[in-house]
Image (tube, coloured by chain):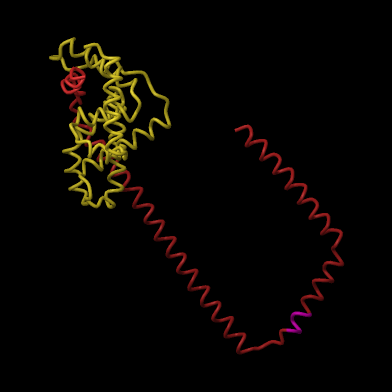
Chain colours: A red, B yellow
């Protein structure tokens, strides 16, 4: 076993001197820096959009709440009116609605079957 | 860690790192250098998380080993690059060329962990404790891999 140990110690792999190695590494690091900067930029952009959405939502919500206090409406009359018009709509278009739901179910079934086949092919 | 300090550390560690990967890649210098660069970029990206709890070299070797393992998972093992062994500096004798050829061919036959343990212990002269931290396996298992690696090498190397 001593011979093997000596053989390994005496025959360490020789690394060729490559002056471009560090240069190439630095180039890769700079490329990574570029990607990191772009990701940071997009993250900041997304954060800004989120904050703006939050502020706009708060303003709209506050306005709606203020309006509901300033101009109160009888909720029961609105609710009854909505329910009556919904029932009238269902009665008038029930055949068409059944047809649309059936067509959607068939399309969904066909699409799912095709999806399974294509995934099996992969 | 600042970029300057990182570059300074890398400059010191690049040769041992490339040698370790060269042994793992059975003498394929191009692949070893590619993996070394990949490891250095990974280390650079993660340099903020390096807390200095271990030596920088230990941390870097661990990243390099993980890069190598990732590469092995993605690619089938290739044949030993004999031309690397033959393309030794002119002053090297043909005897040396033959020895390196033998070494790389023997290393190719070892399981990954045995090969890594042998390379780190004999070529980089690291302690069992450091190798254990790099390969993330207990010290007793490292000793077992070293012993088993030596046995396997003995079967493939003519002394």
How far across and how far down the image is residue A17, in percent? 18, 27
Q: Indicate whether residue B50 is drawn in magenta.
A: no
Query: Is residue B119 positioned above or below A82 on the image?
Result: above
- Residue at image x 21%, y 14%? B99
A58 lies left or right of B133? right
Judged by its main secondary structure, the magenta piece is helix
- Residue at image x 39%, y 30%? B72
How far across and how far down the image is residue B4, in percent? 18, 48
Residue at the outermost top position: B94
A111 lies left or right of B66? right
State which quarter of the image contains the C terminus of chain A.
top right
Query: Is residue B33 positioned above or below B157 on the image?
Result: below
Residue A79 in which image quadrant = bottom right
How far across and how far down the image is residue A3, in percent? 18, 17
Residue A99 in which image quadrant = bottom right
State which quarter of the image contains the N terminus of chain A.
top left
A9 lies left or right of B155? left
Q: Indicate whether residue A79 is drawn in magenta.
A: yes
How far across and how far down the image is residue B63, in percent? 30, 40
Q: How many numbered marks are there?
A: 0
Question: What segment carries the magenta color?
Answer: A76-80
Query: Is residue B53 positioned above or below B126 on the image?
Result: below
A60 lies left or right of B147? right
- Residue at image x 36%, y 48%? A35
Residue at the outermost left position: B91
Query: Is residue A94 positioned above or below A83 on the image?
Result: above
């Amino acid at each position: 076993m001593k011979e093997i140990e000596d053989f390994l110690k005496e025959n360490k792999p020789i690394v060729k001197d490559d002056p471009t190695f560090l240069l190439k590494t630095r180039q890769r690091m700079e490329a990574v820096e570029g990607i990191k900067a772009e990701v940071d930029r997009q993250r900041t952009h997304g954060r800004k959009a989120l904050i703006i959405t939050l502020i706009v939502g708060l303003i709209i919500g506050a306005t709606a709440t203020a309006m509901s206090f300033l101009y109160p409406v009888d909720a029961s009359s609105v609710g009854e009116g909505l329910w009556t018009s919904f029932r009238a709509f269902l009665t008038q278009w029930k055949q068409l609605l059944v047809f649309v739901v059936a067509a959607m179910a068939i399309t969904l079934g066909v699409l799912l079957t095709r999806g399974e086949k294509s995934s099996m092919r992969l | 860690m600042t970029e300057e300090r990182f570059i300074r550390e890398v400059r010191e560690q690049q040769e041992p790192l490339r040698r370790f990967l060269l042994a793992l890649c059975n003498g394929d210098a191009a692949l070893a250098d590619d993996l070394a660069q990949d490891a250095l970029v990974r280390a650079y990206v993660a340099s903020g998380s390096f807390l200095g709890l271990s030596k920088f070299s230990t941390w870097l070797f661990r990243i390099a080993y993980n890069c190598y393992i990732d590469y092995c998972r993605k690619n089938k093992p290739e044949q030993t690059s004999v031309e690397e062994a033959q393309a030794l500096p002119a002053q090297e004798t043909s005897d040396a060329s033959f020895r390196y050829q033998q070494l790389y061919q023997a290393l190719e036959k070892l399981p990954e962990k045995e090969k890594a343990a042998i390379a780190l212990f004999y070529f980089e002269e690291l302690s069992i404790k450091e190798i254990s931290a790099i390969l993330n396996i207990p010290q007793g298992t490292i000793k077992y891999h070293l012993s088993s690696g030596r046995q396997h090498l003995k079967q493939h190397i003519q002394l």
